[in-house]
């Protein structure tokens, strides 16, 4: 694989897209846990949705 093709983003269900999806999901999950631990209430209550 040449250096030119390595930096090209392929759209769709690729392994790179799935890796980023998993990473962002983990960040969201840890952020939700941190909000609950710090505030003592759920995320939806914290944002005033419920």
Image (cartoon, grey):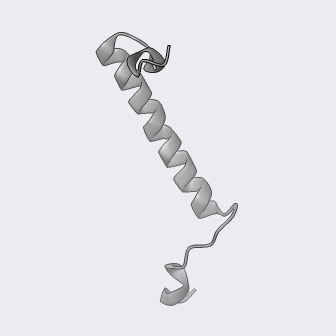
* Relative to 6, 30 lies left or right: left
Looking at the image, is 23 positioned above or below residue 35? below
Residue occupying the far front of the picture: 49
Instruction: Estimate the x, y position of residue 9 in percent, counting from the top left.
Output: 56, 73
Instruction: Estimate the x, y position of residue 29 in percent, counting from the top left.
Output: 48, 32
Instruction: Estimate the x, y position of residue 47 in percent, counting from the top left.
Output: 41, 22
Residue at image coords 48%, 19%: 49
Pick whichever, 27 or 44, lies toward us.
44
Looking at the image, is 20 positioned above or below residue 5? above
Looking at the image, is 5 positioned above or below residue 15? below
Residue at image coords 61%, 54%: 18
Quadrant for residue 36, please give it.
top left
* Relative to 1, 47 lies left or right: left
Pick whichever, 11 or 15, lies toward us.
11
Residue at image coords 58%, 86%: 1
Instruction: Estimate the x, y position of residue 50 in percent, counting from the top left.
Output: 50, 13
* Relative to 17, 34 lies left or right: left
Residue occupying the far right of the picture: 13
Residue at image coords 55%, 46%: 22
Quadrant for residue 10, please give it.
bottom right
The mark tally for this picture is 0
Residue occupying the far top of the picture: 40
């Amino acid at each position: 694989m040449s250096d030119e093709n390595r930096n090209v983003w392929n759209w769709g269900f690729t392994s790179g897209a799935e890796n980023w999806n998993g990473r962002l999901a983990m960040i969201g999950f840890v952020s939700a846990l941190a909000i609950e631990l710090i505030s003592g209430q759920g995320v939806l209550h914290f944002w005033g949705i419920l």
